[in-house]
Amino acid sequence: MAKDKQLDALEDAAPGVGVVKDRKLNALADEFTEKRDAKAELAEQMTGSRRRFWIAWIEIGVKVFRYADRIVSIKDGSVTSKSSR
């Protein structure tokens, strides 16, 4: 089995910093870290998509539109979104 990421990171840790040797806990920590990093990457992608969306929206000059089950509108520079249900 490959060496846990935590063990690599803490190999030269300061005195008093212990290494947790519970493989299940380390595996769960690795899983969490990977998902957290994926979420951060997705957030960056969403920001880019949102920015392109707003630019296109402004270029077209639309103030209110319906998308899926949402009604989205711009009023005084702020955006509101309501469910159309």
Image (cartoon, rainbow, N blue to C red):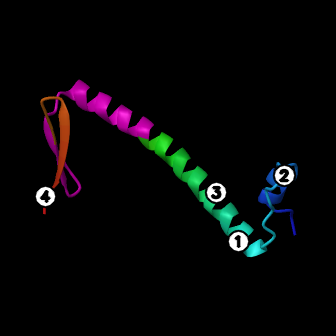
Span shown in magenta = 47-72
The answer to whether the residues at label 4 and label 3 have Cβ atoms under 8 Å apart is no
The residue identified by callout 2 is 15
- Verify whether residue 55 appears in magenta: yes
User: In the picture shown, does residue 10 fall above or below 3?
Assistant: above
Q: Residues within 10 Å of mark 2 (few under 14, many from 20)?
A: few
> Dot 1: within a 10 Å radius of its alpha carbon, few (fewer than 14), some, or many (20 or more) residues?
few
Relative side of 79 to 55, left or right: left
Q: Earlier in the sequence, mark 4 or mark 3?
A: 3
**Secondary structure beneath label 3:** helix
Residue drawn at (32%, 36%), measured in percent from left and top? 53
Q: Residue 84: which disc?
A: 4
- Gap between marks 4 and 1 measured at Cα: 45 Å
- Camera-side residue: 61 or 15? 15
Separation of marks 2 and 4 at Cα, in angstroms: 59 Å
Separation of residues labelled 3 and 1 (CA atoms): 12 Å
Q: Are marks 2 and 3 in contact (CB under 8 Å)?
A: no
Q: Which residue is mark 1?
A: 25
Which comes sooner in the sequence, label 3 or label 1?
Answer: 1
| Helix, strand or loop under label 4 | loop
Given this view, does label 2 or label 1 mark the residue nearer the observer? Answer: 2
Element type where label 1 sits in the image: helix
In the depicted view, which residue is nearer to us: 59 or 3?
A: 3
Quickly name the residue at label 3. Answer: 33
Q: Nearer the viewer, mark 4 or mark 1?
A: 1
Q: Position of residue 48 (x, y in %)?
A: 44, 35
Label 2 to label 3, Cα distance in Å? 24 Å
Quarter of the view holding residue 69? bottom left
